Amino acid sequence: MDRMFLIVSTLLAAIGGVLGMMSVHRGIRSRWTVIWMVAAFACQIGFLSIRGEARGACPLRDLGEILAFLGWSLTLFYLVVGPPYRLSLLGVFTAPVVVVFQAVALVPGVLSLHPVHAIGTDSWRETHAAMSVLSYGALALAGVAGVMFLVLDHQLKEHHLKSGLFRNLPPVRELLQSMMRLLWIGCGLLTIGIVAGFLMPRTGGMGHLIAAVATWVGYALLMTVKTVRGLTGRRMALAAVGLFLGSLTVFAFV
């Protein structure tokens, strides 16, 4: 039953992304992508609820659950940041990322078919896992906003001012503001996750925690440089995309 929720949410996100891109191609701004993503979000909650009950803890015990949780987190931040800030087109760029994460989670062997009930869960460990993965949702969406900025920048330079995509893309300032907002949120959540990681009992290696700290340092340096010296929008967008792609190496330690 849990896999069915994940399969349906993946299909809904894929449909939302495809229909949204078709609307953009015709030069029409459609709200259907938001509706499809809301439906996908509801199914993601269903999946996580069933897995959480089976685990007796936050469902972040295998790579499949982590990827599904990351897909939920990415969708959550899109629904919070996208429509209210007139960034509905963000869903067209977000949906494929969610589909990729959840499709990988559905690959045989990635998601445990018989989740084992956790014994003796620790609050610090649960906080570390939940906040860390939740932060990756915000940072991933910041990367998606960065990709949108780079696309807009390219279209401006190539003078493709009449394309459907250009007409539907939000203003540059709104994209940059949303990207910065998401980066600050992601860094804040990751900070909480790292602090909890140092406070939780040691039961294994610290490779994933070291990788998380390295990720935090990278983003902290980016935000410091942006605040102190300033960065062009293009460099900020490239850094947001590059840092997120590099930070995915943390999952090699799961």
Image: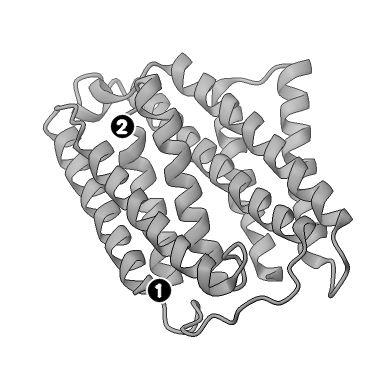
Residue at 53% over, 65% down: 52
Q: Position of residue 128 (x, y in %)?
A: 73, 54
Q: Secondary structure at mark 2?
A: loop
- Residue lying at 27% horizontally and 63% vertically, measured from the top left: 8
* Cα distance in 3D space between marks 1 and 2: 27 Å
Question: Is 30 placed left or right of 45 in the picture?
Answer: left
Local packing at callout 2 (Cα closer than 10 Å; few below 14, some 14-19, many 20+) is: many
Which residue is labeled 2 in the image?
89
Please state which amino acid type lies under the numbered disc 2.
Leu
Q: Is residue 157 visible?
A: no
Q: Which residue in the structure is indicated by mark 1? A: 106
Where residue 62 sits in the image (x, y, percent)?
Answer: 59, 73
- Is 229 in front, or is 83? 83
Quadrant of the snapshot with the N terminus: bottom left
User: Farthest residue toward the left?
Assistant: 26
- Specify the quadrant that holds the C terminus: bottom right
Q: Name the residue at 38% across, 26% down.
A: 152
Up the image or down, 42 lies above or below 115; here it is above
Which numbered mark, 1 or 2, is in the foreground of this view?
Answer: 1
Q: Quadrant of residue 22?
A: top left
Residue type marked 1: Leu
Placement of 12 over or under 118, stated as above or below:
above
Residue at disc 1, secondary structure: loop
Q: Are marks 1 and 2 in contact (CB under 8 Å)?
A: no
Q: Residue at x 83, y 47 (%)?
A: 195
Instruction: Tell me the crowding category of disc 1: few under 14, some 14 to 19, or many 20 or more residues within 10 angstroms, Cα based.
Output: many
Q: Earlier in the sequence, mark 1 or mark 2?
A: 2
Q: Viewed as shown, does residue 147 lie left or right of 91? A: right
Regarding residue 80, the answer to whether it shows in the image is: yes
- The one nearer the camera, 48 or 75, is 48
Q: Is residue 93 left or right of residue 161?
A: right
Give the percent coordinates (x, y) of residue 177. 53, 19
